[in-house]
Structures are given as structure tokens and as C-alpha cells.
Image: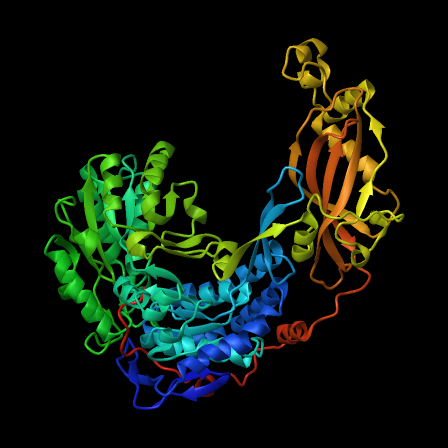
């Protein structure tokens, strides 16, 4: 029988001993064995710290982002093999798409964000300067640097691909190596992805390791620079969080636990409305996608008391059309649970729920499996329950059946529905279907403190909605209380979780030398050559141009009003201006910007290619007719842009601009961005060159199922993973 391998110390190794047998969730056939016995977990952590950490930290955010992009492209070219293996977990093609394409899509998303929102540096400057002294000679800034440890990532059985890639994308982009521990029951699919990742040659040595099997004493060897990201049951999370090393070293522990997510039908969404139909469709979908094995699945459904019968009838009809069976067959919309052990867990939870709720649809007697043996496979029927006294019978708010099970509960008012939502004691996501924005506001503000994400749906957003159960890399995934109290993804927020935020204090010049970002008070360099005549490489941080002066005339104001169409009274009506807060006529703020540009722009063709944008504009003092202005332009920050075929090599330069009046008082402050030509294409680092080669590599025919991923299927699952 195939034995899964662990990837430790940059080598594929089999665990010793018999290991855990993993099974095909559809057929019950044995597909592999998983064991981590014999692995030196302390050595794996040390390898990550001493080899992987330095290798990844040497790269900039942009270099790491390019590796993520190349890795995503490499996996995309080979994903059909992953789909084949994913079917063993009981996943339909649609389920596999969420897991496989969703995971790869997260790599793409962070590759893009890394290049757009993070600097081409190994650290991140968080926020602007903080003034700490009256004279401006002592300031503060925050920087974020990679933690110098290892990110231990423990994932759930339900998303063996996405679970790994969504954590890995943020930790790798942050510059931190990872040790990935998937849930054993579906680890054969994770191992298949891991083999592709390693064979791509894209990941620096020591930056990625994999454990298929028990994590043993891994967490006992954690230090203060290490972190743990856990997805799974609240009970397992609590056990891990109480580990001696975790507590002694204050190890960062991010938990995303199973929760009792809700969906609510608004009081206006009566039968016959689009919102009612959308609600029924979404609840049924979330019950059956991945056979209900999603940490974001709808477990509690709140409906107006007068609509209970209509909702139950509509749900029965919808669920009756869900064909259960072998996911490879046409028309099958729900496969089995991940394994027999999971079936037993769900059965226990359902028994507890049924003590407080009535079964209104489904159950064991209704299970009709197409193309498979229900006794051999891990099949479980859809079950819809009804709890008519949701404030008295607490089981639906306390017990989660991690399968295709949902409980309908009535409410009499929006206030009552909001209180019901809170009884879950913290959830990953809630959703509301209503056409009334006032109801959406009331529910959102009333339940947000208890939920990590809220989806507010009506007929206008439904077509493009990503759905109740879809965590996105752009938004945080996590929730308070029972949901674990953590956050994952959320754009750059997920990256910063793996970094240390440190406050710097010092003179503006010293702080600028550390951050490579100029701030006021730091040294300015004035050259005879206009800065717009210099190529990107020639510009220095702190290089400054102090312009000549210009006196603002009434003709300027009148002409600008005619050109812009802005005849606001403060510019054009002398009497009204006298009675205003300005006390007399003022120049347009945008005229001041235009005039400042005229003062500092060098008109002849040169290395400056285009104006790229403007940030942080503030008009701090009025400019009156007769005032004389001048501008100070300082090179604040430089970021080289990635070279693209057919494009002029270029970079983005951030310029600090301060416009002052005749008394030296600031009247406008802002940052402008320009695209500036580089003298030559950027020389590729060895890592860059490796990425470029991989992007041009076609998926080899040699990626054979038997050789590259003769992987298996679930056997025993560690305490439920979400």
C-alpha cells in the first residue's frame, strides 16, 4: 500500500511503523498509510529557523510575491491530477473547485497584493511619522519585520488544499518559513500538492516542510519567535493553546475554530420576493456543499415566525433535488463525509440536537446513494431540524453537527433575531437576506461584535455575491469567542500577523536612514540638476527642489474658475466671501495644486514618464489673492516596478510636496507619485531567474499519478478540523 511521505529537512522521508490507514470516502477502499513516527520535530524547527528563515528574509516582498505567482501558475498547470485525488475525499467537482482553485487563487491574490501594496523591501513601514517633540528633532515610526522563527500551520480535513495555501501565502509573503501539518484523514491530497510545490524548485531551502501524521511533540519545542496557526475544533485548539511552550514563550497562536454560523431571512423577504428565493437557495447550498463540512456552513437559520411553514416547505423541495452519491457521476451534487469517523461524530451531535428540535426533513431513512455503497462509503443524509423555542432550548446554539445539518428557528422581531444570532457565542460568518437597508444596518451593527464577517444580500448584489460560505483573501477570515478569536487573510493584515511591529524613535534623519523613507526634518539634498532630469537610479532619498515663487492674482482665480467651472462663492463673490469664515476671496485649492506643479515640473522630455497619482492631500491654510506661494519637492520613497515585456523599465517615486505662502506657512501638503524611467532593466537575482524559468515551464507529461502522487485517503481524523 502507498505510504505518504513527510517533507523534512528538505528531503522526502517515510514515517516508521504501521501508521494510520486512510480510506476512500466514496468506496471505503484503503488508499494509503500516513505516519510521522521517527521524525525529529526539534530538528525540523531548527532547520526552518536556521536555513529557511534567512533564505526567505533575504528576499523582498516583491521577490516573494513573484515566487507565489509562479507557484500558483505551476499548480494551475497540474490541477487536473489534484481534482482526481480530491474525489477520494468525497468532494464533487464543485467542492474540489472551492478547495483547489480557491487555494491557488489565494496564492495569486497575495502575489498581486505583495507587489501592489507592499514595498520592494524586506520590511514594511506601518503608518506615517509621529511627532514626539515640539521642535521636530525627535520622531517615531513603526516598522514591521519578519519573525525569526517558524510558522507552524495545523489545518483541517475539509480543505486539504485551500487550508494549506491560504496560510502559506501570507506567512511566505511575510518572510517566514512554514511547517504544515494537515489533518491526517485527507493528508494524501495535501501531500500531492506539496510534491508539486517542491518539484517546482521555487521554494527556498528550509522554507517549507510537511508532516503527514501526528504532530508529536512539535509544539513542545516552540520558541518566542515561532507562531501557530490552527484550524479545527475548539476542543483541540484549547488543548494546543495550553501547551507549556506556547504559554511560557508567549507563542503567537491564531485559531479559527468551528462555529455556529447563522443566516437570517429579513421580515420583508416574504414568499414570492427575490430575497426569499435567494435565501432558500443559499441555505440549501451551504448545507450540501462539501457535504456541510465547512467551517463557514450555515448551522442556524432564523426566520420570521409567520414564515416558518413557508421556509420549511421551500427547503424540503430544494433539498429533495440534491442527489447524493459518487461525486464522479453526472448529476451527483453531494458526496460523502471525509471518513467513517466523521460520520460517527456527526451522528453524536445530531442526537443531541434532536433532543431539542423536531426533524422536519431527511434523516437516515431517506438516504438514497447513487453509484456507491452507503455502508462502505462515509455517506450521511441531509437533515433539517426545527426548534420552536430557540431561547429555551439551547442545543442549536451550543452543538455543531459538522455535516449537512441545519436548524430552523423562529423570531418575532428584528431585535429578537439579533439576540438569537449572539447566542452562538461567536461565529465566523452570518448572513442576512433583506431588501430593507434599515434592517441590514440594524442587524449588522447588532451582530458584528459576535461575527468575523457579515454578508448582506438583496436582489441587487446576489448575482455577483461570492456566497455566505466563501472566505476571501481580501477580507478577514475568523471570528470571536467560539470561532477561535483569530483572523486569517484580510489582505495585508494576514501578512502582518507573521511580522513584529516595532516602534522606532530618533531624529528624522536617523529614522529615515533605517526606513529608507524620508520624512520632514530629515536631511535634504539640493543639487544643481533638476530632480525630474534624473533617472530612477540617480535619485536619492531626501533629494529636494525648492522652487521659485509665484504671486496669486485675481486674474488667476477668475481664469481658473472659467476653465474648471468652479464658481464657488468664496472664490468669486467678494461680499459673500467677507461674510464667510475666509473673510475675503480665496484661490481655488486645485489652482494652488496646479500652480505648484507649474513651479516644480521640468517641462522638457526626460526620465519622468507620467504622473502616477496623488495621496494625502490637505489644504491647511487658505491662499488669498495677493499671496505668494512656493513649493518644496522632496524625494520621499522609491519603488522599482517589475519589468514587463514591451514596457520601458521604470519605478515609482513618491515625492513629498509642501506648498508655503510668503510667511513660510504651509498652505497645502501632499504626496505625488511619478513613473520614472530606469536606466536599464533590473538585473534578476538567482531567485528571480528561477521564477522566470518556472513561468516558462510547461507541465511535464512526467507528472504521473502513480509516481508523483500515489496518494491516499482519510483514515483517522484528529479532533474535528474545520
Q: How many marks?
A: 0
- Outermost residue toward the top? 575
Q: Position of residue 350 (x, y in %)?
A: 16, 61
Q: How is the image coloured?
A: rainbow
Q: From this viewpoint, is residue 558 visible? A: yes
Question: x and y percent of residue 436 in the render?
Answer: 35, 33
User: In the picture, which quadrant includes the C terminus?
Assistant: bottom left
Quadrant location of the N terminus? Answer: bottom left
With respect to residue 348, does 135 lie above or below?
above
Residue 132: % across, % down: 59, 42
Q: Name the residue located 45 percent from the left edge and 48 percent from the top edge.
A: 464
User: Along the line of sight, which residue is nearer the eye, 567 or 169?
Assistant: 169
The answer to whether residue 188 is left or right of residue 653 is: left
Q: Residue at x 13, y 59 (%)?
A: 352
Q: Residue furthest left?
A: 355
Q: Is residue 696 left or right of residue 94?
A: right
Pick the residue in front: 80 or 438.
438
Where residue 335 appears, x then y in whole percent?
29, 68
Q: In front here: 517 or 638?
A: 517
Given residues 262 and 671, the one toward you in this image is 671
Q: Is residue 514 above or below residue 340?
A: above
> At 55% from the left edge and 83% from the top edge, which residue is drawn?
701
Question: 130 left or right of 529?
Answer: left
- Is residue 434 among what the camera can see? no
Amino acid at each position: 500500500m502507498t505510504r505518504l511521505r513527510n517533507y523534512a529537512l528538505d528531503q522526502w522521508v517515510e514515517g516508521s511503523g504501521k501508521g494510520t490507514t486512510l480510506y476512500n470516502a466514496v468506496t471505503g477502499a484503503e488508499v494509503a498509510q500516513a505516519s510521522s513516527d521517527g521524525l525529529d520535530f526539534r530538528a525540523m524547527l531548527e532547520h526552518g529557523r536556521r536555513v529557511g528563515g534567512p533564505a526567505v528574509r533575504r528576499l523582498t516582498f516583491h521577490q516573494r510575491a513573484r515566487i507565489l505567482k509562479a507557484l500558483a501558475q505551476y499548480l494551475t498547470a497540474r490541477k487536473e491530477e489534484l481534482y482526481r485525488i480530491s474525489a477520494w475525499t468525497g468532494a464533487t467537482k464543485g467542492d474540489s473547485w472551492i478547495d483547489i482553485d480557491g487555494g491557488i487563487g489565494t496564492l495569486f491574490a497575495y502575489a498581486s497584493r505583495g507587489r501592489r501594496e507592499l514595498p520592494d523591501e524586506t520590511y514594511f513601514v506601518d503608518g506615517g511619522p509621529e511627532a514626539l517633540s515640539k521642535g521636530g528633532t525627535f520622531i517615531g515610526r513603526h516598522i514591521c519585520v519578519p519573525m525569526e522563527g517558524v510558522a507552524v500551520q495545523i489545518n483541517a480535513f475539509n480543505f486539504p488544499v485551500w487550508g494549506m495555501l491560504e496560510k502559506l501565502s501570507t506567512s511566505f509573503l511575510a518572510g517566514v518559513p512554514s511547517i504544515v501539518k494537515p489533518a491526517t484523514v485527507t493528508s494524501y491530497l495535501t501531500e500531492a500538492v506539496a510534491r508539486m510545490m517542491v518539484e517546482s524548485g521555487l521554494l527556498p531551502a528550509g522554507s517549507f516542510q510537511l508532516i503527514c501524521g501526528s504532530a508529536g511533540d512539535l509544539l513542545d519545542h516552540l520558541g518566542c519567535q515561532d507562531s501557530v496557526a490552527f484550524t479545527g475544533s475548539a476542543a483541540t485548539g484549547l488543548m494546543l493553546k495550553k501547551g507549556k511552550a506556547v504559554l511560557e514563550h508567549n507563542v503567537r497562536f491564531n485559531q479559527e475554530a468551528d462555529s455556529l454560523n447563522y443566516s437570517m431571512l429579513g421580515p420583508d423577504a416574504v414568499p414570492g420576493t427575490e430575497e426569499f428565493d435567494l435565501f432558500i437557495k443559499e441555505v440549501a447550498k451551504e448545507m450540501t456543499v462539501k457535504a456541510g463540512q465547512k467551517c463557514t456552513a450555515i448551522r442556524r437559520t432564523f426566520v420570521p415566525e409567520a414564515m416558518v411553514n413557508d421556509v420549511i416547505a421551500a427547503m424540503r423541495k430544494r433539498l429533495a433535488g440534491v442527489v447524493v452519491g459518487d461525486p464522479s457521476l453526472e448529476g451527483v451534487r453531494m458526496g460523502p463525509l471525509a471518513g467513517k469517523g466523521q460520520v460517527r461524530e456527526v451522528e453524536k451531535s445530531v442526537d443531541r440536537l434532536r433532543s431539542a428540535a423536531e426533524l422536519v426533513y431527511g434523516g437516515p431513512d431517506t438516504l438514497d446513494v447513487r453509484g456507491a455503497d452507503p455502508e462502505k462509503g462515509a455517506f450521511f443524509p441531509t437533515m433539517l431540524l426545527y426548534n420552536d423555542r430557540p431561547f429555551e432550548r439551547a442545543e442549536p446554539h451550543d452543538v455543531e453537527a459538522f455535516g449537512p445539518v441545519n436548524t430552523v428557528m423562529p423570531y418575532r422581531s428584528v431585535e429578537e433575531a439579533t439576540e438569537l444570532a449572539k447566542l452562538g457565542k461567536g461565529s465566523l460568518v452570518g448572513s442576512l437576506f433583506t431588501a430593507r437597508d434599515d434592517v441590514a444596518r440594524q442587524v449588522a451593527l447588532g451582530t458584528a461584535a459576535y461575527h468575523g464577517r457579515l454578508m448582506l444580500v438583496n436582489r441587487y448584489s446576489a448575482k455577483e455575491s461570492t456566497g455566505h460560505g466563501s472566505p476571501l483573501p481580501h477580507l478577514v477570515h475568523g471570528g470571536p469567542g467560539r470561532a477561535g478569536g483569530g483572523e486569517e487573510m484580510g489582505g495585508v493584515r494576514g501578512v502582518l500577523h507573521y511580522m513584529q511591529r516595532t516602534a522606532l524613535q530618533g531624529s528624522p534623519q536617523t529614522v529615515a536612514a533605517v526606513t529608507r523613507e524620508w520624512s520632514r526634518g530629515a536631511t535634504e539634498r539640493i543639487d544643481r540638476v533638476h530632480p525630474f532630469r534624473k533617472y530612477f537610479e540617480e535619485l536619492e532619498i531626501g533629494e529636494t527642489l525648492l522652487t521659485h515663487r509665484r504671486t496669486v492674482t485675481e486674474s488667476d482665480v477668475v481664469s481658473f474658475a472659467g476653465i474648471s467651472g468652479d464658481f464657488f462663492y468664496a472664490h468669486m463673490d467678494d461680499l459673500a466671501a467677507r461674510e464667510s469664515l475666509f473673510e475675503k476671496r480665496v484661490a481655488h485649492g486645485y489652482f494652488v495644486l496646479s500652480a505648484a506643479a507649474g513651479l516644480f515640473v521640468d517641462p522638457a522630455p526626460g526620465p519622468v514618464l507620467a504622473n502616477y497619482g496623488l495621496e494625502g492631500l490637505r489644504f491647511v491654510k487658505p491662499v488669498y489673492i495677493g499671496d505668494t506661494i512656493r513649493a518644496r519637492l522632496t524625494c520621499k520613497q522609491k519603488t522599482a516596478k517589475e519589468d514587463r515585456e514591451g514596457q520601458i523599465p521604470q519605478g515609482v517615486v513618491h515625492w513629498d510636496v509642501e506648498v508655503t505662502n510668503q510667511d513660510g506657512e504651509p498652505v497645502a501638503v501632499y504626496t505625488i507619485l511619478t513613473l520614472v524611467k530606469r536606466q536599464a532593466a533590473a538585473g534578476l537575482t538567482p531567485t528571480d531567474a528561477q521564477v522566470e524559468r518556472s513561468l516558462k515551464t510547461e507541465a511535464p507529461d512526467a507528472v504521473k499519478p502513480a509516481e508523483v502522487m500515489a496518494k491516499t485517503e482519510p483514515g483517522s481524523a484528529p479532533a474535528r478540523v474545520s
